[in-house]
Amino acid sequence: MSEKEILLDVRDLCTVFQVGKRKTVTAVNGISFQVGAGEILGLVGESGCGKSVTSLSVMQLLKNTSGRVVSGQILLKGKDLLHCTEKEMRAVRGKEISMIFQEPMSSLNPSMRIEAQMVEAIRLHTDMDKKAARDHALTMMRKVGIANPETTIRSYPHQLSGGMSQRVMIAMAMSCDPTVLIADEPTTALDVTIQAQILQLMRQIRDNNNTGILLITHDLGVVAEMCSRVIVMYAGRIVEEAPVQELFAAPKHPYTQGLIASVPKLGSGVTSLPSIPGSVPDLSMMPAGCKFAPRCSKACDRCHQTEPPLYRLKDGRQSRCWLAESEAVQPAEEKEEQIG
Amino acid sequence: MSENNNSVNSASSAYMDDPVLQNRSRAREFFKKFCQRKTAVVAGCFIILLIVLAIIGPSIAPYDPDVYDYSNMRAAPSLQHLMGTDEFGRDVFSRLLAGTRLSLGSALAAVLVGAALGTILGILAGYYGGILESLVMRGSDVLFAMPDILLCIAIVAIIGPGLINVIIAVTVFTIPSFARVMRSATLTVRGSLHVEVARSLGCPDSRILWKHIFPGTVQAMIVNFTMRIGSAILAASSLSFLGFGADVGAPEWGAMLSSGRNFIGVADHLILFPGLLIFLTVLAFNLFGDGLRDTLDPKIK
């Protein structure tokens, strides 16, 4: 895995949102991760922890919001996207990086036929004429398992089911053969059978095109199924990174432990599930020390005072917890003072 | 549905989520819903009648609207002259028919131009925000702060009387209402996921505006359009009534009302029929607009 070509390299990404005149909140704070060719990287965390903002930052789609990326690098095959002009970014979006979204039913323009939308997506980045683009659209639709593309391509989005819309979205996102695919909770709005099919489809795409996929989800089941490596986010920070098996076998960070414990296991016969007490702190009123400390069962005084750095552990794992200090390969990262 | 799909596609697809094709025509559904609103349907029929009259009116008029008949001045309505004759003996019915074109035409022209300009400004303001938005919206607020008629009079006073200038004046006071409505419609559509998807696919702004945002705002525009025609007719007629608009001799409804008011005591049919027609036309457009809004608005069932 380490030998694979790195497609997307995000370094120390910080995204802040302007709230009010002078006040800002940091939604994403110093996030670094890499997506290699043919790799599926999971990004897990509960609502509001910055997963979607991370993906929007990578795509530079924060223009219409009050958010902006303040520091860091987003390297796509070595090219820093943060230094691209809007025009250059347009050429990257859809061509190099594509994105699929959470709600397939509202992802498609209700006033356009599928045909028009797919042809548009294709012609934005290629020189194909309408006819060739339509043929390519049909090929793509067949590839994503749409049984009768000729009928589907002439429908309007409201005539399609959720799973069908998501397939069309994937076909659209994949139509220009992007190297990186960002899937922002692609299966959340679908029922489980369709979920399994869509996930299978994404794996298939990865196998065929060697696409690097950043899979954003809050469903640990999906992560276990799909990903090779997982990043756990909490309150805009990475709290743990690990290969998927090891994450589930031995989670290092108490937050991850809590997350995994709160997933029901088949046949365990428990009547009530353990949960993590409390809720995610408001981004504008973050606790001083470790952001998870108020909810953490293992928190000590030190946790409440200073935030732990992201410790590098063996096997490429990382954990942002004082408890991991003893296992750290490197004592701490150079970014420590910045985080504190 | 599913049975059908399974039997047809089981060989080619193992997936269960084949398209649920609902072959219903949107236009038919809309028409059915609209027909449930009786007043709006009646209003719609009246509008269609007006439009037909505006097109063929002069040719079916029993008399020439501009021919004087001094032997038959201010005659009361009779079988010969359905709505009587005016102070120069001209047939009121024929003049109203001929005037439909003028009154309806000028209002339509004004609202069309106003809608086009207002829509462009509103969509741009809603999409880009920032200084452009402040400029457009504050400008609209300034125009909104003044009563419609007063604004029109002020504009006509500056650029001079005449039918074309009345159209310009009505256009100016139509723009802000469209700018405001279209901006809010744009804000709603701009935030929707499919616009973000379009951007994530690398769509340029111009295309997003035209292909992905504009179609979503058309409903709001159509409704506002019908609503504004009513007030535009009223404004254009008022201006003509006040002597700022069409030529005094022209068969414009407001102008007819204006010249008829001198004879209110002796020949009330001179103001009754033009006034009634203006009233009915404005009412029809407003009721029609209400009906359209209720049918098109997904929030109202």
Image (cartoon, rainbow, N blue to C red):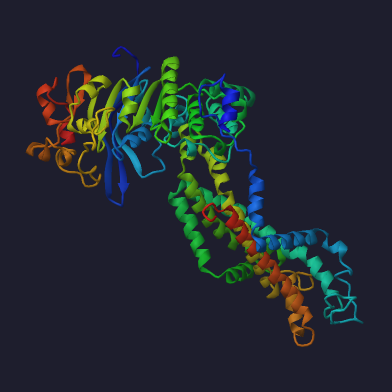
Q: Residue furthest right?
A: B71
**Along the viewing direction, whichever of A327 and A9 lies nearer the viewer:** A327
Instruction: Tell me where residue A122 appears, x and y as whole percent.
Output: 54, 26
Answer left or right for B93 relative to B114: right
Answer left or right for B130 relative to B152: left
Total marks placed: 0
Q: Residue furthest top?
A: A3
Residue under the point 68% across and 65% down:
B284
Q: Which quarter of the figure has residue A222?
A: top left
**Along the viewing direction, whichever of A150 and B225 lies nearer the viewer:** A150
Looking at the image, is B214 positioned above or below residue B39? above
Q: Which quarter of the figure has residue A228?
A: top left
Looking at the image, is B206 positioned above or below residue B105? above
Answer left or right for A233 relative to A287: right
Q: Residue furthest left?
A: A301
Instruction: Tell me where residue A19 appears, x and y as whole percent.
Output: 31, 49
Residue under the point 75% across and 73% down:
B274
Answer left or right for A2 relative to B287: left
Residue under the point 80% across and 58% down:
B55
Viewer can see residue A127: no
User: Looking at the rendering, in which quadrant would you find the N terminus of chain B?
Assistant: top right
Instruction: Tell me where residue B171 appears, x and y as whole percent.
Output: 62, 60
Viewer can see residue B179: yes
